[in-house]
């Protein structure tokens, strides 16, 4: 009998309004282990709101977000435990500026995962080494470049040993010369089989690295598919128009 794999995350009929402004309209998608899903689309199309709903930073107006089949939008969900399994990396890093690099990467491990300090330190060091930031353990975030900060933020997310990671335009706040070092870390994670949902404007990266691409327009999934199809032979006029901006 063939093994039937079930999705890690399922978004079903997700809608979100702010007042009378409907920002997400009946979004459906799912993520399986090892998927790298890139979400592309113009500014204002609802990409961040979608990730923020998945991470429970926003409450959906309607619809479901199922994590291993359980609806996380229901009362009684332990949000901190859920976020330790579905980590998020933000455009603006969101590091704790009063803590060192090492402390940033240990905080969730001790507070949420309840590991002892020695284990947390070993875990933090392991992932800081992975992103090439081990020599900066005693630095404060404001002593680092944008690319270094984002690599620390990725290490902090990895230190929770999550099942999947969400990235919201992780390179959009960076000077151009620092984009590559962050994308390189993400590319390596993808190659190692990390499950990721990535909002990005880096089209070459999305084409190379993703298993699936979702194009959002005005709060709906306007087109989705394999990267070769979506980038090479887009079907919708709106997709063609959007991609033409990057040529
Ligand atoms: P994207 O990430 O694709 O640029 P966003 O999800 O940030 O898009 O925003 C989609 C729309 O939702 C925009 O029109 C934005 O102004 C609106 N929006 C986002 N967050 C809020 C909020 N907290 N309150 C009101 N409107 C919001
Ligand atoms: Mg956004």
Image (cartoon, rainbow, N blue to C red):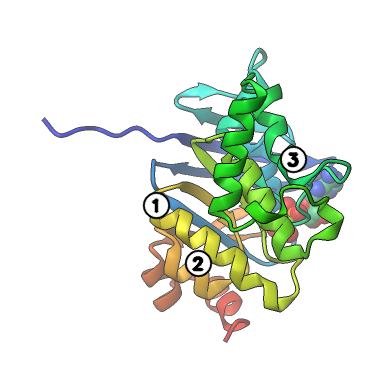
Confirm or reject: label 3 Cβ below 8 Å from ligand 2: no
Q: Quadrant of residue 80?
A: top right
| Disc 3 target residue | 104
In the rendered image, residue 164, in percent from the top left (x then y), is placed at 51, 40
Residue at label 1?
Answer: 192
Pointer 2 residue = 206
Question: Which of pointers 3 and 1 indicates the residue nearer the eye?
Answer: 3
Q: CA distance from mark 3 to mark 1?
A: 24 Å
Give the mark nearer the N terminus: 3 vs 2.
3
For image coordinates 70% across by 77% down, the residue present is 176
The quarter in which the N terminus is drawn is top left
Mark number displayed over residue 6: none
x then y, percent, for residue 10: 48, 36
Residue 21 x %, y %: 80, 47
Q: Residues within 10 Å of mark 1 (few under 14, many from 20)?
A: few
* Side of 224 where 241 appears, left or right: right
Determine whether label 3 and label 1 are within 8 Å by CB: no
| Left or right: 144 as drawn, with respect to 133 | right
How far is the residue under mark 2 from the one under mark 1? Answer: 16 Å
- Secondary structure category for the residue under label 2: helix
């Amino acid at each position: 009998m063939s093994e039937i794999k079930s999705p890690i995350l399922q978004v079903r009929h997700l809608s979100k309004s702010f007042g009378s402004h409907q920002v997400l309209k009946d979004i459906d998608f799912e993520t399986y282990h090892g998927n790298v899903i890139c979400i592309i689309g113009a500014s204002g199309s609802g990409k961040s709101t979608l990730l923020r709903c998945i991470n429970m930073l926003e409450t959906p107006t309607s619809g479901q977000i199922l994590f291993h089949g359980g609806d996380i939008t229901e009362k009684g969900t332990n949000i901190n435990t859920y976020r330790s399994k579905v980590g998020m990396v933000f455009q603006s890093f969101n590091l704790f500026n009063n803590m060192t690099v090492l402390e940033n990467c240990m905080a969730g491990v001790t507070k949420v995962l309840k590991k002892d300090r020695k284990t947390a330190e070993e875990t933090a060091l392991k992932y800081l080494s992975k992103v090439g930031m081990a020599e900066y353990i005693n630095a404060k975030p404001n002593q680092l470049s944008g690319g270094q900060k984002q690599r620390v933020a990725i290490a902090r997310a990895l230190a929770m040993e999550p099942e999947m990671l969400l990235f919201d335009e992780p390179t959009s706040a960076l000077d151009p010369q620092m984009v590559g070092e962050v994308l390189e870390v993400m590319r390596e994670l993808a190659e190692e089989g990390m499950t990721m949902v990535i909002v990005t404007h880096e089209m070459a990266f999305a084409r190379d690295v993703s298993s699936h691409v979702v194009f959002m327009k005005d709060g709906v999934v306007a087109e989705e598919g394999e990267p070769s199809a979506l980038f090479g032979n887009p079907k919708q006029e709106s997709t063609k128009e959007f991609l033409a901006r990057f040529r």
